[in-house]
Image (cartoon, rainbow, N blue to C red):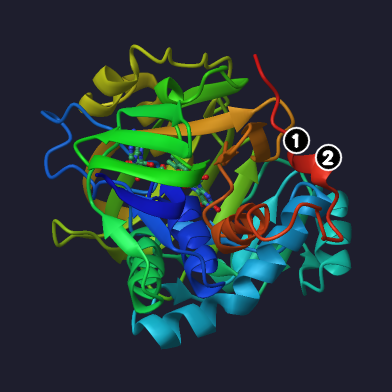
Amino acid sequence: MPASYEVAVIGRGLIGSAAARHLAEAGHKVVVIGPDEPPDRRTSQGPFCSHPDEGRITRIAGRTRVWSELAARSIARYTDIANRSGIEFHSTCGLVSSSPKISEWLENSELAGGKARAVDTDWVAAETGISLTNGHPVLYEGAPAGYINPRRLVNAQTNLVEQAHGLVIRESASTLTEGLDGYQIDGDCGSLTAERVLVTTGAFGSELLNRPLDLRRMPRTTVTAEMSIDGDLPSLICVDPPDNRLEEIYWVPPVRYPDGRIALKIGGNLRGSEPVTQEALTQWFQSDGDPIEVEALKNSLLGLLPGVEIISWAQKPCVVTNTSTDHPYIGWVESGVAVALGGCGAAAKSSDELGRLAAELFNSENWNDSLPSSAFDPIFS
Ligand SMILES: Cc1cc2nc3c(=O)[nH]c(=O)nc-3n(C[C@H](O)[C@H](O)[C@H](O)COP(=O)(O)OP(=O)(O)OC[C@H]3O[C@@H](n4cnc5c(N)ncnc54)[C@H](O)[C@@H]3O)c2cc1C
């Protein structure tokens, strides 16, 4: 007889580990199923995650009111998560952002209780050494904006699931089948049953759902630059960066990577990039990414930090999972199966609140939140 749970969370990334924590701490009998990062991405068959990194920007200023509120609520809980798990994951180096939409970001920040303020390019150059020449307005958001370590946040959430007596299975699931008393889950995770299921498998796992969701898996290449630089840099988001093959770039300031390098990570969106098909996903994660994107990111970094000395470069592929609404999908997709999917390249910082909202689906029949459920409605393709 397979082991039985009230709720199974499939996918132990940023959102799934957070949802499992909230469910376990609310007293549900929970299992969370999901592998650790593959030890060697070049030979692994997946599934892969979108958080295999040492830095993800965190900020309250966001592109919609919903994103700003999600971030503010999550950031308010970072200290509690770190204290109770014993795992630190947050650095408060601040954020500079330059975009034509800065006035909207500032408004969204203020509504969510953030402290972002308008600054000019001279201030940015004097305070940070960053040279912004795109002509767009600029904001600065001080602490608690900065970055989080996503790997450590997943570990912290997983630790708290276990503290709350949830079961953690560090393997993947390959099938989800409806039975008489709920759902049967099978795969490397073994065989188990659950009354209800939450699917949080990021870019992967579409085979677990009966109807495909409208998700666009966008291939992204990131570059890390080991550099010598005086002083501390803030996180950065810059629309229309120096290399105009990119729509936007962001960076996380220098942090230590597992290979020992202390490096700044830069990524962005290549203009006209197309989604990667489900079939090609694994091959993409095994690759070196896109050489054109790499070149454009390097040029942008050198333009934004004039005179910087780069000691070494490295590059890596990743995937951003976009929805058709520009907000994650959180809701029921069939009787007993809910999803929390589609981070839209912005969910790491807000993953704790996204996980909490998903967990709430299992606590109450009604949506009881000031954020409208319609912002998160799953859309089928
Ligand atoms: C390059 C890059 C830079 C980013 N920068 C930022 C940033 O600066 N700030 C920010 O807030 N956000 C950022 N993001 C977005 C953020 O990382 C994602 O939104 C976030 O990781 C999404 O969380 P998730 O839980 O949906 O997916 P993931 O974190 O990918 O987790 C999904 C998990 O499900 C598992 N899984 C898949 N299939 C199965 C299966 N069949 N069985 C069991 N488990 C399965 C995977 O192994 C994975 O661990 C960035 C994303 C990328 C790719």
Instruction: Say whether residue 317 is visible.
Output: no
> Tag 2: residue type?
Ser
Q: Residues within 10 Å of mark 1 (few under 14, many from 20)?
A: some
348 in relation to 81, above or below:
above
Q: Secondary structure at mark 2?
A: helix
> Tag 1: residue type?
Asp
Regarding ligand 1, which quadrant of the image does it lie in? top left
Q: Position of residue 25 (x, y in %)?
A: 51, 74
Question: Can you identify the residue that label 1 sits on?
Answer: 377
Q: Secondary structure at mark 1?
A: loop
In the displayed structure, does residue 178 sit left or right of residue 76? Answer: left
**For the point 14% across and 29% down, which residue is it?**
42
Q: Position of residue 146 (x, y in %)?
A: 54, 68
Q: Position of residue 41 (x, y in %)?
A: 18, 35
Q: Quick one: 326 or 353, which is closer to the camera? A: 353
Question: Can you identify the residue that label 2 sits on?
Answer: 374
181 in relation to 379, above or below:
below
